[in-house]
Image (cartoon, rainbow, N blue to C red):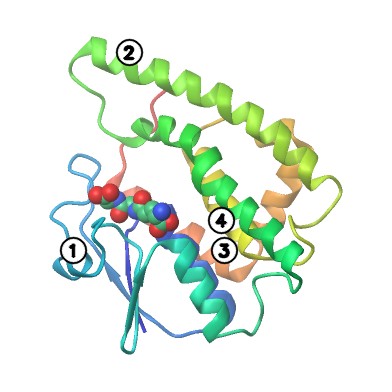
Amino acid sequence: MRLYSGPLSLFARKVEIALYEKGVDFERVEVAFTQTEGYRPKHPDVVTANPKGQVPVLVDGDLTIFDSTVILEYLEDAYPEPPLYPAGPKEKARCRLVELDADEILFVDVRRLLYRTEPPLADAERQKARQDEGQRGEKGILGHYERLAEQLGGRDYFCGAFTAADIGMFTTVHYAVRMNGPRLNDFPPLAAWYRRVCQRPSVARVVAEIAEADGRLSWPLSA
Ligand SMILES: N[C@@H](CCC(=O)N[C@@H](CS)C(=O)NCC(=O)O)C(=O)O
């Protein structure tokens, strides 16, 4: 199996955590990425496989697929042990909704902070506009954290056992943490969940790899 991944791609990292959890061996192909150019030049295999030109792309024998959610669902069907989705249809739907929340709701505000590890812009006005956008992101994230902490309540994970919901939510929250976003400690259930998830070997490995990639690719955090 081969995975086209980006060093700082939270969507590709979701897939890596799932592969480690399931104990599936894979070859990791790191595509080009810099903080100044983004994902350029595009890897030709990624362009061929995905009309959106994005990672992650997974190749398993004669199957080539893209999109982290589609890939996680395929991995669950093809490599069911250990499961990363709950068993019943309603529980499964709730799990998918948490993953969607991470990818499409929380991420909208986390994305507003990503400029913080990019080189500062020479144009002061444009830099200020990015910082204002960052403040909007911070405010949005605070609202999401409040909602997510309430959703977790006293539970260890979002959907009973550790699932794809926790994988998706973790990679997005971890990006907010990396970008010096709002303090998790102000939301105790979410902070406890974050620490718990960090202790899983699959997650610890990916967190260490992201830190290594930050060391070679990212600028020191700015406000
Ligand atoms: N919904 C997609 C999002 C994938 C995505 O945004 N990938 C980014 C890296 S994190 C990418 O390849 N961006 C390059 C581009 O859009 O040109 C998924 O879940 O896989």
Q: Which residue is mark 3?
A: 203
At mark 1, the secondary structure is helix
Q: Earlier in the sequence, mark 3 or mark 2?
A: 2
Where is residue 63, by image quadrant?
Answer: bottom left
Q: Which residue is mark 2?
A: 128
Residue at coordinates 14% horizontally, 67% vertically from top-left?
44
Where residue 133 appears, as percent x and y from the top left, is 41, 20
- Could you tell me the amino acid type at mark 1? Val
Extreme residue in the top direction: 125
Q: Is residue 3 above or below residue 51?
A: below
Where is residue 161, by image quadrant?
Answer: bottom right
Q: Nearer the viewer, mark 2 or mark 4?
A: 4
Look at the image and tell me whether residue 209 can be seen: no
Q: Nearer the viewer, residue 199 or 98?
A: 98
Residue at coordinates 57% horizontally, 78% vertically from top-left?
76
The label on residue 168 is 4
**CA distance for labels 2 and 4:** 31 Å
At mark 3, the secondary structure is helix
Q: Nearer the viewer, mark 4 or mark 1?
A: 1
